[in-house]
Amino acid sequence: MTRLIGQRAIASLLSLMGLMILVFFLSRLTGDPAVLFLPIDATEQMKQQFRALHGLDAPLIEQFGRYVWDLVHLDFGESLRKARPAIDVVLEAYAWTLPLALITMGLVVVAAIVLGALAAFNIGGFFDRLVSVVSLIGASAPDFWIAIVAIVVFSLNLAWLPTSGVGTPMHWVLPVAVLFVRPFGLIVQVVRGSMLSALTAPYVKTARAKGVKNGPIIFIHTLRNAMLPVITVIGDQAAALLNGAVVVETIFGFPGIGKLMIDSILQRDFNVVLAAIMVTAIAIFLMNILIDIAYSLLDPRIRH
Amino acid sequence: MADALLEVRNLSVDFHTAHGTVHAVRKVGWSVNRGETLAILGESGSGKSVSASAVMNLLDMPPARIVSGEILFEGRDLLKTSAEERRALNGKRIAMIFQDPLGHLNPVYSVGWQIVEMMTAHGRPADAARARALELIARVGLPEPERAMHKYPHQFSGGQRQRLMIAMALMLKPDILIADEPTTALDVTIQAEVLALLKELQAETGMGLVLITHDLGVVAEIADRVVVMSDGEIVEAGTAGDVYHRPHHPYTRKLIGAAPGKGEIRRPDDSSPVLLEIKDLCKTYGHVPALKNVSLALHKGQSLAVVGESGSGKSTLARTVLRLETADSGEALWKGKDLIAMNARDLLSVRRQIQMVFQDPTQSLNPRMSVYQIISEGWDIHRLVPDRAARRKRVAELLEQVGLLPEHAQRYPHQFSGGQRQRIAIARALALEPELIICDEAVSALDVSIQAQVIALLDSLRRRLGISFLFIAHDLGVVRDFADTVVVMKSGEIVESGPTGEIFEDPQQPYTQRLLAANLDPDPDVQAQRRLSASAPA
Amino acid sequence: MTDLTLPKSSQSGARGGIAALLAMLWRDKVALVSALVLLVIVICALIGPTLLGDLATDQNLRGRNSPPFDLERGWAFVLGGDSLGRPMLARLVVAARSTMMVAAGAVACALLIGAALGLVAGYLGKGVSQVIMRLADVIMSFPSLLIAVVVLYVLGPSVPNMILVLAITRIPIYLRTTRAEVLEVRERMFVQAAVVMGARPGRIILRHILPVVAPTLVTIATLDFAFVMLAESALSFLGIGIQPPDITWGLMVSQGRPYLTSAWWLAFWPGLMIVITTLSLNLLSNWMRIALDPAQRWRLEARSTTNG
């Protein structure tokens, strides 16, 4: 296990480095921050000053060298927009995204497993069809549209929930609910399919021949086997959430990493973009390790 | 008969499938008592497992529906008993083991847990269950029971897994054990051991045994009585000896007649030239040697059989000769030229002369190609028979040659039965007019009666067209009927080789002798005789 | 002596080709409806702009934000009017073209490039395969939003560039699927049988491996079409995708957002169109997964015998 984690860490570190190089140079292709940050009538001299101040006048390769040197000393540079260390800005935003992702994923996993398993056991019945229809629509609807419809219904017409911002627990309801829909739709379909095939597996026959009751057959014999493909999908969906939900965060004015990332890209706040990408990559790396551990706990064939 | 422990009466089961209703079994009746062994004999699709599944309440309903009948256990009709009461009987009074123990054991739980569950599911305390499990794991002959408890199914061999299944089934000392093809996936020597174990345990516990099988040899070895099933009906019933020696129904006669290993042994004629000569062939996978200095010679127009159990390297031999695997060292001389060292262009022309028929025709035929495309593909590759009309004519001829109809050319593989698919595979091999056909377990996936037909077909091709065969097989009966020369392999090495007659009548090596002894004869009297003589010296 | 009778299932599946597929589609009503919906949308995308192009750009200040289901202003206003008084129905039909074009273009490019690289990576030796796979890893771990912004800023936001962006981000999906399938299929017995017969790699890839892999790819592409459409909508919604005067459904939702309180239909209808299209694609893809697999096809063909 530790060897696996070690291999994964090295592979992730390598791809992170590649990613950093790409992002560093590509993001500088998108334009000159001086044009964006200074007033439209700024003189060329002012622009030069701005560039010199932020070290943007040096040749690209030199800028990159300096960036890497600082990075080795755990300095991610300054945010142009906020005039604060980029890493602080990023971690602040992540402190919002992380609970959002965890709460949403927690709810999705519980709901998808319970409903998917029950649907599979009740195959072809009313409940199964209901779950199938709901999950398909969930997997098909664009999140920004659900968000807008939810705002119209729950915030404007019914006035139950705030439209945007953060502060009270009520502010979390709509973002979580909107983010819930798509992963739930996808995962519940995988759970259902995987349960269905597990229920026809020969070892279920053995369990029935042993006189094991239905409850243990579903929840002990079958569910653990059916979870194996589900875990992979959960990992993919969780990774997407950890990347930040750009659209939902933008619509609900939620100060998470997704919103920070898009704002920083649009305003050429390069240091924040790079720091955000690295923090996200580390979060996803840690989550992949959790997925691996979950996998090997569930399936002895991987352990041995 | 009236007071049998378990009796199935007049049972009919329908399956409602996409193609309408299938009568899986019709008016089936059998019974079994304590201490007795009943065999249910039938080929695939005969419905031989259905009544046993009905006893265990394992039929999925729907699609299955029990149309009529009774299943009496101690005089009580199980079909009128509640599901909960039947569950309580399962495992406790009637236990069952299956053909494929790897699939039938849950892969994510330790075998100890699964064996213990047999008792805890019926409300027994866990520590008593553990003690009994340890005792039984030792009894079925596994080393280090304590450690075995903590291992998972994939860490055991096929034979060990079946022993563990048996241990599990015996946890609650059931009155009846139903065994569904328990030895089919096992090597012959392992099969003999498992059957012997079942018999010992039956003598110890006095349980009744219902054994579902397709193998006359297994019936001869273990059954007191037998019912023969065909097409969902019982066509014959009686003691094992009576049924074998005095069959009434034509189907039973056909089945017994098709049992391999009864024909005349051929005496090879070594005057024909050597076609393929293998010299010191070696191959290792990682550190595991698969072939160790294998040498043999195949004469033109003859069939040479390579026999051995799983892991003996016999398939690797075929694959290496065909360059599907690369040999580490050694030579395979095809008409004097080394196949192993041959360049791509020479190899292409040799590929025309050597064809292969694989074990499972379901997998060896491309499911997305029609029979016509499958058979004519070789001509595309080697740029032969360019004329379309000539092609169609030749495909039709080939189909007739292997016992199919010309109009089958436009169909797809999944529309044929297993035996028919293997005929298509043979037609594909024949299309290139090869001099040698390598058969890798080409008949082992087929039912006995189909097997006999395919063997007859291959033999007629050998006689009429002078094709040579390299015949890889584990079934000694088939080899005895078909081969001129036999090579016995074990762990990548040739143990013994010689003319078929010598190997079968006077085996020199202990391993060959064991292999032959473990090979079950379909005649119950012969098996009884063998058992007697095996125990007599002691 | 020989077994000439075919097993029962042989009556089915004898017919090949498109006619059989259509017959199967006819029997599965859900898939049929999905296919018809998609057909209508495709037809709209093809001929809609020619027929309704003028209507869709015709500003009518008296018809600003006119409510739906009011036939007074003519059939074009049945779904209401937008903030400049243009009929929603005509706008939706016109937007269908760029929406479909972006999604179809991106999926087609990603499919072709991904499948070709996947076949090569799967069939050829380890070295080539490693390089291709690492490249896919980098694309996968690269935030697609960033790719989008970079490309669209450097090259300018237009339909072809949008296709390029989305195609790049989707290539790894096809690449990985194709490679995984090829690795599995090349070990199958019928491929080995072809090797034994002397078939060269080109023939094996094209005749034996590709036909087995293709249905999976088509199924994934259908599903992915929905995904790409959602991605394009999201980018357009965020303002970094398609720019006016070009128009897609995602952009329409974005443009309708300021009027949520007064005219909900501005954002609702285009969103609903996206849902309907993706839902149809999902349903059709589920059906194709079975229909394109000869071993499973009987499940669909069989329904006729049970359902009459």
Image: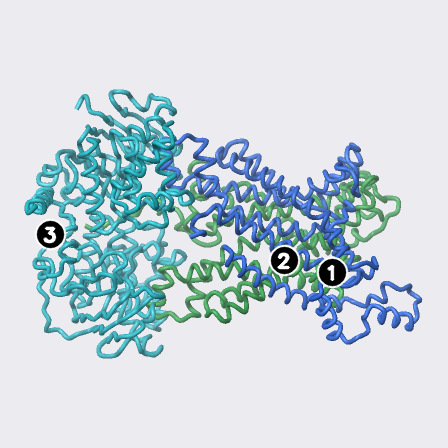
Type of amino acid under label 1: Val
In this structure image, what is the colour of chain B? Answer: cyan
Who is closer to the viewer here, B436 or B283?
B283
Q: Which chain is blue?
A: A
Residue B352 sits in quarter: bottom left
Who is closer to the viewer here, C112 or B317?
B317
Looking at the rendered image, the disc whose residue lies closer to the viewer, 1 or 2, is 1
What residue is drawn where x is 74% and y is 55%? A90
Image position of B345 with respect to B376: above or below:
below
In this structure image, what is the colour of chain C? Answer: green
Q: Position of residue B505 (x, y in %)?
A: 8, 58
Q: Which residue bears the numbered disc 3?
A: B262
Residue A161 sits in quarter: top right
Q: Position of residue B202 (x, y in %)?
A: 20, 35
What residue is drawn where x is 43% and y is 31%? A214
Type of amino acid under label 2: Ala
Q: Which residue bears the numbered disc 1?
A: A273
Q: Whole-Å distance between the Cαs marked 1 and 3?
A: 80 Å
Helix, strand or loop at mark 1? helix
Q: Whole-Å distance between the Cαs marked 2 and 3?
A: 66 Å
Q: Whole-Å distance between the Cαs marked 1 and 2?
A: 31 Å
